[in-house]
Amino acid sequence: MIKHIVCWKVDNAALSLQYCDGAAELLEQMRKQITGLIHLELAADQSRTDMSADLVLYSEFESWDALAHYDQHPLHQKFKDYLGPHRTERRVADYEV
């Protein structure tokens, strides 16, 4: 299994929950339609420390190929287009368990 974690800083941390809510329908479509995607969740940080990200995406995939498929999938591209104008920083980690 491949775990894919992405953390973002956004232009207005106070809107993090709204950004999550705004993406909810798109995330549900991704869960249902992207082959090889096992689990997907998006959440807003609640600790609000100087070291915190504002949003985190946690996902699990069947294989590296499934992650590559997700990366190119049109629904993932729509999600990137949705969040892109709001993000100011992005960090990612991918690993196999």
Image (cartoon, rainbow, N blue to C red):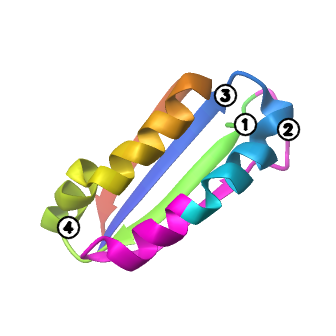
Mark 2 residue element = loop
Q: Quadrant of residue 37?
A: bottom left
Q: Is residue 21 left or right of residue 30?
A: right
> Whole-Å distance between the Cαs marked 4 and 3?
27 Å
> Disc 4 vs disc 1: which is toward the camera?
4
At which x and y percent is residue 32? 41, 78
Q: Quadrant of residue 69?
A: bottom left
Q: Residues within 10 Å of mark 1 (few under 14, many from 20)?
A: some
Can I make out residue 88 in this image?
A: no
Q: In this rendering, is residue 31 above or below 49? A: below
Mark 1 residue element = loop
- The amino acid type of the residue labelled 3 equals Val
Label pair 2/1, CB-CB below 8 angstroms: yes
Mark 3 residue element = strand
Residue highlighted by disc 1: 52
Q: Residues within 10 Å of mark 4 (few under 14, many from 20)?
A: some
Q: Which mark is residue 10?
A: 3
> Whole-Å distance between the Cαs marked 4 and 1?
29 Å
Q: Residues within 10 Å of mark 2 (few under 14, many from 20)?
A: few
Quarter of the N terminus within the rendering: bottom left
Q: Give the mark, 4 or 1, whose residue is nearer the N terminus.
A: 1
At which x and y percent is residue 2? 30, 68
Identify the residue at horizontal 19%, vertical 71% (top origin): 63
> Disc 2 vs disc 3: which is toward the camera?
3
Residue highlighted by disc 2: 48
At which x and y percent is residue 66? 20, 67
At which x and y percent is residue 84? 50, 29
Q: Which residues are magenta?
A: 26-50
> Disc 3 vs disc 1: which is toward the camera?
3
Residue highlighted by disc 4: 66
In this view, the residue farthest toward the left is: 65
